[in-house]
Amino acid sequence: MIHDSIAVIDFGGQYAHLIANRVRRLHVLAEIRQPEDPIEMFRAYKGIIISGSPSFSSFGEDATYTKAIYDLSTPIIGFCFGHQELAKHYGGKVVHGGKEWGHTDLHICAGSPVFEGLGKTEQVWMSHFDSVVEVGPDFREIGYSKLGASGDEHRYAAIASEKLRRYGFQFHPEVDDTIHGDAMIRNFVIDVCGCRPTWTMGNYVDEQVRRIRERVGNESVFLLASGGVDSTVTAKLLGMALGPERLHLLHVDNGLMRKDESRKVLEMFRAAGLDRNLHFVDAADDFLASLKGLIDPEKKRLAIGNTFVTVFEREARRLGISDHLLGQGTIYPDTIETGGTKRADTIKTHHNRVPLIEEMIKRGRVIEPLAELYKVEVRELGERLSLSHELIWKHPFPGPGLGVRLLCSNGSPDTTDFDRIAPEVKKAAARFGLAAEVLPIRSVGVKADLRSYEHPVMLSGTAAWGTVLEAAGTIFRDVNGINRCIWNLSDGTPSRFVPLAAEVTRERLDLLREADHLVMEGLRLHGIYDDVWQCPTVLVPLSIDGCGRELVIVRPIRSERAMTAAPARIPEALLTDLRAGILALPGISGLCLDVTSKPPGTIEWE
Ligand code: XMP
């Protein structure tokens, strides 16, 4: 089936993905397009949405993108930056100023199909510095904004040319804070563009089964099955399409799995009836050997990715199936985050996009039936395929596993810029009654879509949860060079931190596995496993106050798509359990809770 679809032009940040998700919820396929994509790539869409941008301004600079989209008769709508660009293109004027941020009232002052069914005043969410102050000849204002009864009026918050089928919203309809944003997007997608809502998981199953059969022909597929939601849903789909004979599943214990994970995964595949050609290999030694001596996070990631391929090739030869296609459970955001978004720096290399796999993709030897789906859609698909609740709602676990949660160090402290940062951090934290220390290590973060590799701050002291989050937020805002805050759950106010020379070893992995197990069991026992989206436990080789032992950090988050995340609150009773359990592990002397949102921190530490 050819679906009616919408192109979302991605000017960076999270906006484009949020918009695409909103459109897909209407059962219309939305695809992310890059601003420079050639015009041919836009022709088949029934509508185009130009996203907002965290880093571009429509004023004073000329953004480069395929402006030939404006020559198409396809309906176009722009949000925020997209609104300003569209207004400018058609003869309007944009100035620097008229900043609005947060909730604002939109006053709808003229009828338009995009506002069909809405009230006269709507709560919308704004985040802009530049403003449209004039529109071109074919356009008119259909809404202005005003904060409360006494606020200033901001003109041209929404503009339209019904003749050209061009629309612009200064606000962001894709965020929840725009109460009827969904209705506005629906009006554009369904009524203005005339898209038929055929993008349903039921259709997706039928289509994929057909596409897999066409693609695979008489060949067979070999799938690396980690046991996570993505690869299991992939296995189920491939199994449906090809039958059990032509699907070979290989579960690799890379030594970087959670405690008992491989045993549970094999049991789960058996229960799901996917065990006809289920192979298992314990390759922990291969992975440990490839990680030997590596400290740098990207090198570790690359070593793990390459070892997966080496092990896969070796096992395929051993099992006599080396000419098979390689199946992968890659999902849509995985294909976007690694340089897929041109204006985003490589935030980190996803292991299913390492060079060796890229090369196999080029040769057409890789099949990725979920590559068009977001996580929520994969879960919906899993439900449709009758996979168990436990599996579908299992926390996502990264391909490189505990490898990216086991920090390594050459033992030398990194105190770059501490003279400037430390006093600023202490001053900001003191306002909230907390002590703060900058740690002489670094972790990965993401700021305005660029990768950051900066110092974490440890906050100590007693304070309410909200206060700790506020302190962290203040530090991120006020102090350059900090992308993460952790809250000390151990006793005292530590002040001396020395990195310990440490690499990836079986002993350290076993220690991390125990700590992680305590956290996972704790979440289940306290009934909050399903409320928390993901909860990495991280082992950091950092000796506190000369104790010579390591630090454990627990990172519970709430998220929808992992593109953004907020720290999740853990009940006091569970914190007490974790203190008792984790601090009693041999080799551990500190326990902290990561209280960082994404951005500025990423979910994983590396
Ligand atoms: P970050 O750390 O970038 O993570 O906020 C976003 C989501 O991606 C997962 N993640 C990975 N998954 N291979 C994977 O399969 C990887 O290399 C990888 N790195 C991060 C992470 O757990 C989170 O869900």
Image (cartoon, rainbow, N blue to C red):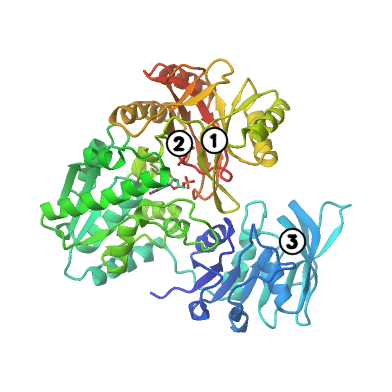
At x 57%, y 54%, the residue is: 449
Which residue in the structure is indicated by mark 1? 568
Q: Is there CB contact under 8 Å for labels 3 and 1?
A: no
Q: Is there CB contact under 8 Å for labels 2 and 1?
A: yes
Instruction: Please report whichever mark, 2 or 1, sits nearer to the chain's N-terminal start.
Output: 2
Instruction: Give the quadrant of the C terminus.
Output: top left
User: What is the three-letter code of the residue carrying label 3?
Assistant: Gly
Residue 112 in view here: no
Residue 546 in view here: yes
At x 70%, y 68%, the residue is: 61
Mark identifier at residue 190 = none
At x 81%, y 59%, the residue is: 98
Between marks 3 and 1 in the image, the one whose residue lies nearer the viewer: 1
Per the model, the C-alpha gap separating discs 3 and 1 is 35 Å
Instruction: Please report whichever mark, 3 or 1, sits nearer to the chain's N-terminal start.
Output: 3
In the image, 248: left or right of 202? left
Given residues 416 and 445, the one toward you in this image is 416
Whole-percent x and y of residue 1?
38, 74
